[in-house]
Amino acid sequence: MLVINNDTLVQGPYDDLLMFAANRKVADYITRNYALRMNQKTKIIRSLEEELDFTRMSRDAAVATCQERLDEIGRLKKDLDTCNEKKASQRTWATIGKGTGIVVGVGAAFGLATLLKQSIAD
C-alpha cells in the first residue's frame, strides 16, 4: 500500500501504516504539549521578570530614601556638635553671670535692709 500525507510517503503493510500514523499523532501531540508548556513557562518567566523589575525599582527608591536620611542625620550631628561647642564656650560666662546675679541680689537685699533699718531708726 502507498500513502502520501503532506510531506511523508509511506509504502508498506496497512498495520505498519496505522502504527506510523499513531506514532506521528503521538509525536505531534507531545510536540504540541511541549510547545504549550514552553509558552506557559515563558509567560510565567516574563511575569516574574516584570515583578523583579518592579522590586528592583522599589529597592532603588528605598536605598535613595535611606541615603537621604543618612545625609540628613550626618548634617544634624554636625549641627549638634557645633551647638555643643558654642554651649561649652559660653559655660564660663554663664557661671560668671550667675555669680554676678547672686552678688547683686544679695547686695540689693543687704542695701534694702540697711535702708529699711535706717528709715525705721529715724
Image (cartoon, rainbow, N blue to C red):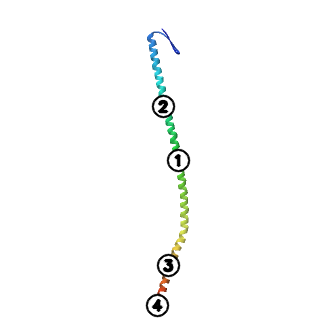
Q: Report the residue marked by disc 4.
A: 121
* Residue type, label 1: Val
Q: Report the residue marked by disc 1.
A: 63
Q: Residue at x 43, y 11 (%)?
A: 15
Q: Report the residue marked by disc 3.
A: 105
The reply to whether dot 1 and dot 3 touch (C-beta < 8 Å) is no
Location of residue 26 (image quadrant): top left
Q: Residue at x 54, y 48 (%)?
A: 64
Q: Residue at x 47, y 21 (%)?
A: 28
- Dot in front, 2 or 4: 4
Q: Residue at x 49, y 29 (%)?
A: 39
Sequence-wise first label, 3 or 4: 3
The reply to whether dot 3 and dot 4 touch (C-beta < 8 Å) is no
Q: How many marks?
A: 4
State how far apart marks 1 and 3 are (Cα). Answer: 59 Å
Which one is nearer the viewer's eye here, 54 or 92?
54
**Helix or strand or loop: what does disc 4 sit on?**
helix
Mark 4 closeness class: few <14, some 14–19, many ≥20 residues within 10 Å: few
* Residue type, label 2: Lys
- Dot in front, 1 or 4: 4
* Residue type, label 3: Gly
**Helix or strand or loop: what does disc 2 sit on?**
helix
- Marker disc for residue 43: none
Sequence-wise first label, 1 or 2: 2
Q: Report the residue marked by disc 2.
A: 41
